[in-house]
Amino acid sequence: MTNCYIANVDGREFIVDPGIGAVDWVKKNVTNPVAILNTHGHFDHVWSNQELKDYYNIPIYCPKDDAFMLSNDPFSQGTPPSTPDFEVIGDEEFDIDGVKVKYFFFPGHTPGCSAILIGDAFFSGDFIFKDSIGRVDFPFSNSESMKNSINKFLKFKENYKVFPGHGENTTVFNEQKTLPAWLNYI
């Protein structure tokens, strides 16, 4: 089960990680979508990208280093291909329809794995979860990059609400308590 989110800022809606089976749920819960935001390129987070893009005529934002996964289906899952309109490079900030959207680059789980900050909502994708981290034993994963990403995250000073790609919500400060232990297991 993958978490797909709709972030609503003053009536403008951002669809975050529309995975398998997300289309009907999204259609029932949005009235003014302005963009699709991918945290990374794994099939369970991008499966419904193109169908929603076509239906709503809205752009897809995806980390540049994961864009190949959207069109090439590297895990042979049968993922419907999609093409990002904007390839996000590193820590990059966008003004999308008057709303500040900030990508934070946290490679490790995938080469382009990122988190997305909208207001005080931090969508962590598969970088971190409640009391856990994204796997680094998949093709294209990198354990050293994950260690660097964890160390970068440990420096955050704001206690954002964290909405992960799987599982329960948490906060930055809660995860900063458990993440140092993961550095020894990667």
Image (cartoon, grey):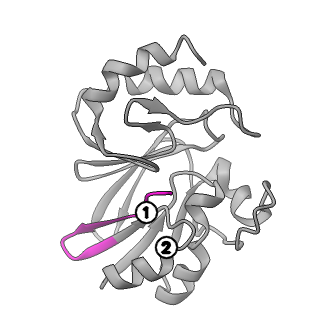
- Which residue of the protein is positioned furthest toward the bottom in this rendering? 55
Relative depth, front residue between 130 and 74: 130
Q: Contact, CB < 8 Å: mark 1 with mark 2? A: yes
SS at mark 2?
Answer: helix
**Residue at 68% across, 29% down:** 142
Determine the image quadrant of residue 108: top right
Determine the image quadrant of residue 101: bottom left
In the image: residue 29, left or right of residue 108: left
SS at mark 1?
Answer: loop
Relative depth, front residue between 27 and 117: 27
In the image: residue 22, left or right of residue 130: right
Please give the residue where the numbered disc 1 appears in the rendered image.
4
Q: Is residue 82 above or below residue 105?
A: below
Q: Which residues are magenta?
A: 1-13
* Residue 10 within the segment the image draws in magenta: yes
Q: Residues within 10 Å of mark 2 (few under 14, many from 20)?
A: many
Residue type for callout 2: Ala
Which numbered dot is residue 22?
A: 2
Residue type for callout 1: Cys
Residue 78 percent coordinates (x, y) = 76, 68
**Residue at 64% across, 41% down:** 110
